[in-house]
Each structure stands twice: as structure tokens, then as C-alpha cells.
Image (cartoon, rainbow, N blue to C red):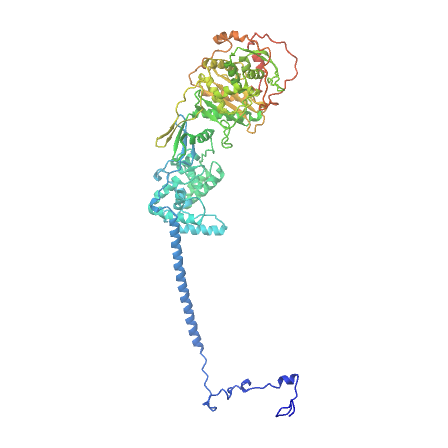
Amino acid sequence: MAWGRKKSGGRKEPQFGLAAALSELRLTPQDRIAAADDKPKKSSAKRKPDDDDDAPPRERKPRASRSGVKRRSKSRGGFRLGRLFYWGAVLGLWAAIAVVGVIIWVGAHLPAIHSLAVPTRPPTIQIVGRDGSVLASRGEMAGANIALKDLPPHLPKAFIAIEDRRFYTHYGIDPIGIARAALANVMHRGVSQGGSTLTQQLAKNLFLTQERTIARKLQEVELAIWLERKHSKSEILELYLNRVYFGSGAYGVEAAAQRYFGKSARNVTMAEAAMLAGLVKSPSRLAPNRNPEGAEQRAQIVLAAMADAKFITDAQAQASIGHPSYNVKPVGAGTVNYVADWIGEVLDDLVGQIDQSIVVETTIDPKLQSVAEASIIDELAAKSVKFNVTQGALVAMTPDGAVRAMVGGRNYAESQYNRAVTAKRQPGSAFKPFVYLSAIEAGLTPETIRQDSPIDIKGWKPENYTHEYFGSVTLTQALSMSLNTVAVRLGLEVGAKSVVRTAHRLGISSKLDANASIALGTSEVSVIELVGAYAPFANGGLGVSPHVVTRIRTNEGKVLYARQRDEPSQVIEPRHVSMMNTMMQETLLSGTARKAELPGWMAAGKTGTSQDFRDAWFIGYTANLVTGVWLGNDDNSPTKKATGGGLPVEVWTRFMRSAHQGVAVASLPKSQASGGGLLSGLFQSASQVSAPPHQPSYQPSAQAPIPSGGGYRAPPTRPSAPPPNPSARPEAAAGLDGWLMDRVFGGNR
């Protein structure tokens, strides 16, 4: 048998290509497509043994009719409605649970309802004068509670008309008002209206803050409902009118009426009531003392709302709009507010933290305060442009330090800076009395002779204003004519430190530089401390503490503070007081302040002008009052040669003449008539003492710079005059004082 040959069958040749691929392809009966009426035959291999090829074909099930489809759709629609109702009920339940939860959460963050009570008023500070009249109020001003029945009917109606027209029909919240406000806000695409009721506003003012949050609004709603349940409508309206804020620190209609109209809320007119009701929307922006036009326009809207609500007739509204009777007080009216601010600064030291309303009784005399204010304002109004002077200050006190009047500036509304207490300026020659007192205490007398001649201290050459020198003069003449060279020589003679100690002993509290220029007042001081330091000259040499508060009490009368009398402290010996009064009295009789003479009164004082005419001063006194005046500019710019003997003397004279009307005339302590008398006789021998043959040496320290410029100009070259007789005192009758005063109008005097 051959290899590769099969036992049976013929040989098959291999095939390739399409024919080879299709050679094994066979169709079965299942692969054939049956005819429409024929059923595909199952393969014999899958037939059951008992199948009968002749069995009739099975009948087809009939298709469902269209009516059945409709019934099925209806059943499905009912199912959907049921599910919608079900889920709606579920969502509604959860929403109710959420609302209850929010209410519980908001209530949990409120104080316990049983502990809620109308809070006490914010503390106020009422400042009264020595006659008991009210001068000013500080803090959140709250007027006395006024019963609703005591107010004119048009006042509460104005608030209801503009703020909550359905006040008497809602229960704390007004859904209609809320919907109206929401619609208006949507139309204006912003917050243009509010839907809060008067009750909600009261709840916010009494118990909540002013923050604009949803939580605060929800708390406001709950508290409004609580207020409606606890109080009647009349009680709520009365509380609202006595607690709402009206701007400018005024709470309640009484405080607002007093603040803006100077009258009680019981007496406001319909136009004024409309203006008050209009303030609630925006107190700061619409305050009539700040924005009278805006306040009036808002008041007209309120009057129209009152007419629309039938609270008043159209004729009444038009009459009030056409002829308003506003009598608005200007904001911060009166310079007495400078006094009120000063009191506010010292209250904490006197009574500590204020947690209740108090009344502060002061030493201020309202009449003198008005005169002082008019004196400063009128003088500046007439001459501020001519002399380039924009500000002024005045302090008047009794010889024991009780402040009777204080003006800290010409207009409190424009500037609250107190130039009488806070500002410190160079006093110029108004400081010289401390130099002369130091010399008197060192053994000199008013008749002592000193040389008025040029002086050179390491390049610093102080000179007199007129560049004139008079040789030998008495201390009285030198002080009355404000001769700078004599003051500098005296300062060197007694020592700068001695001058500083004298000034501090008399009441100057500011830091003073102990150098040669201290004699010409180059160290800065305040008006009130300089006036207080002059007081010992008027009271016989006793040191004083300037003060304005005498007693502090509560509204119920409980005394919280009462000023104790100062223990008398002798800071100047009486005989030295007598000498100083003699010298400074001559300043008003024949010196630089002749315009300040008070007919019938013995007065004394000293003028002062700082470098470059930056400050003009006059401090003068009688046995009744010590008054100081300062004029200048806040930016320390020079004036147009305003001197102490000019504008300040005019202000002082106007004030002092009015202040002394009807007051019994009194003499200064142990003062003598100028130019002679017993005092001159006692010190006649001393008056013959000539000036020292040589000037005392002075070595300024590195910390004491020599001033230059301004009032310290180098004297011009002039022919030397023959020296006067050193033993002869120049007399006013001989023409020296008058001749000098005709030429001296400023410059360190």
C-alpha cells in the first residue's frame, strides 16, 4: 500500500478563491423565508415524537381595541394627579415644619418674652448756667415723655399718614403694605419703599440693632406681634412718638421739637408736625437744621399724605404748604457749645462713666456768654478782612477762677476746635508780667531805673517795635510801653529759670523754655491758663484753678459731685501784688492799652503781639472779672499788623463795659494811683538807682535757640541820641508816653 493514498474514494484536488469559500455553504429550512400563509417548519431533529404534521395552525390573538387604550390613558392620568397631590402634601408639610423651625430658631435668639421690657432712655447730659437756664445738652438728647392726649391731634396723624396708614387695623405686621412695598421695589429695581409698620419700627428701636439682615427682620416681626398683644394701639403709638430718632441726637418728639423749633411738641404747628413726621425716613439726611430744603420737600409729601388719608382737608394741606411756619434753629447754634464740649472732657474725671441722665450745674453766666459771643463775632465781621484775622477766643473768669464766659471760636458749626482751651499760641508781651514779677520779687520796685538801649546776645538783637530807645526808664514805664530790651535785660538779670518758675507758680501749666527769649513770650500757652495766671493779680495773690462745674446731679436730685472750695494758696506776696497792679494799671492809663480804660473802674492788664503779628492778645482785669482775648489764624499765618492794643482791646472793652453794668465798683487789691502817692514815695529812693554799669553775661544753652526774624528784627542804623538824665523819670505830661503811643501799634507788646 502506497504512502499518502487513502483507502477509499478518489483524490480531491485543493481549491482556492471564491469557489473554495462557497463550497461548504448550505441553506437549511430555517434559513428560508416562509410565505405569508406558510409557517416555518421545524427541523426534524427538534420535533417531538408526537408532533403531527397535519395539525391545524394556531389561531392568532386579536389586537386590542382603541377604547382599551383610552381607558389605560385615563388610569395613567389619574395616577399622575394622585402622585402630584401626594408630593404636594409632602412638600407642604415640610414647608410648614421649616417655617415652625425658623420661628423657633428666631425665638430662641430673642430674650425671654417675660423678661422683655421697654428699656430706659439713653443717658443725657443737660448743662445749665448759674441761673438754672439750660445752656446745652449732650449725649442722645431725649425729651420728657409726653402723653398722647397732650399732643395736638395733627402730630400723631402725620406719622400714621406717612408711615403706617393701616395702623389701627393690622396686628403688628401689614401684609398689604409688605406686598405694596415689594411691588414698588421690583418696579424700581431696588429698595424704594419699606413695609414696616409703626409697631415693627418701635420693636426695632427698643430691642434690636439697625443691621439689615433677614434674621433681624424676622425678630422684628415676632417682637411686633408680641408688642401688639402686650400693649394697646394708643400705648404703642405713644411709645413710638417718645422713642423714635429724629436726627441731631434727638430722640422723641419733645426733644426734636426743642432741637429744631425751640418749642415743646405740645405747641408745634401742622407744618412743623409734618416736618417731624418726614424726618423718620432719613433723620441725618433730612434734618431741617442741616438740609432745610430737603426737610421742607419731605414735609409737603407728608401733608399730601394726610390729605389723602382724610386726616386734614386739601385746603389745610395747601395752606400749610404755601405758608410754612418753620422756625428752625441753626445746627450747633451758640458758642456755648465750646463750653459744653469742655465739660464733656472732664466729666469722666468727676463722676466716671455715665449710665444715667444727669444735670451739670456750671458757673457760666448766660448773659455774659451772649455778650462775649457777640463781641468776638461782631469785631471779626467788621475787621477780619482788613487785618486778615479769621479766628478769636475769649475767656472771662472771676478772680477765684470761676469761668463766667468762654468763646472758643467765631462759629461752632463750622469748627468745633476750642481755641480757648485746646489751642496754644505764643503770648508775646502778654507774658512779660511774669518777668517783671520775678524782678519785683528779686528786690526791684516799679520805680527802679533800667536802660532801654540796644542789646546783643550772641547775635540775637531784640528791639522795640518802633526801633526807638529811651535810655533810662522806670519799670512801670517799660512795662506799660512794652519795651522789649528792658524785659530781656530783666530776664537775664533774674534768670530765665526764675521766670519759668514764677509763671508755673501762678498757673501756667504748659512747657516753657528757659532761655533769653522767654521774656518776650516765645513759649506757647493756652488762653484759659494765661487768664488763670493773671487772676492772682486781681485777688490779692491767691492761686486759682479755672473751673466751670459746680455740681452734678441726677434728674431725681441725687448729687453725684459737688465742687469743694479751693484751699487758699498765696502765690504772690500782697505787697508785690500791689506793685504789679500799679505797673499794669499804667498800661491802660498811658500805655499800649489806653483804649481799654473802663470809666469808673480801676483796671489793669497787658497787651501782647507775637512774632510777625501772628497772635494778638490782651489780658485785662478788675476786682470783678479777669478777661483774656486772643485773635489770629488757625494756620498760624501772619495777620496784617493786628496788635494786642488794637482788635483784642476793642473786644475786651466791649465785653467788660457790658459785664460791669450794675456791678458795685471795687478797687484792685492795695493798688495805688499811678505816677505818685504813698507807694511812689516809699520807693522814691529806689527809683534813683541807675542801670548797672555793664550788662550781665548770658550764655544760652544749646537747647535754647536764639529766635530770629519776625518781631526780632535787627534795629536800623540811626544817629545816637544824647543819653537822658538817669535820675529823671520821664513823665506822661512831658510827652514821652503819648509820643511813644502815637508810634507804637504792635510788635511784642
* Placement of the C terminus among the 4 image quadrants: top right
Residue 718: percent from the left, percent from the top?
65, 14
Question: At 41% from the left edge and 66% from the top edge, which residue is drawn?
Answer: 83
Q: Is residue 3 left or right of residue 332?
A: right
Residue 441: percent from the left, percent from the top?
50, 14
Where residue 608 sits, quadrant-wise, is: top right
Number of numbered callouts drawn: 0
Above or below, comparing residue 244 to residue 700 in the picture = below
Where residue 736 sits, quadrant-wise, is: top right
Name the foreground residue: 545 vs 193: 545
Name the foreground residue: 441 vs 333: 441
Above or below, comparing residue 520 to residue 158 in the picture = above
Name the foreground residue: 179 vs 718: 718
Where residue 121 sits, quadrant-wise, is: top left
Q: Is residue 461 left or right of residue 66?
A: right
* Placement of the N terminus among the 4 image quadrants: bottom right
Asked whether the viewer can see residue 605, the reply is yes
Asked whether the viewer can see residue 154, the reply is no
Residue 493: percent from the left, percent from the top?
55, 15
Residue 688: percent from the left, percent from the top?
55, 7
Above or below, comparing residue 690 to residue 748 in the picture = above
Question: At 52% from the left edge and 20% from the top edge, which residue is drawn?
Answer: 500
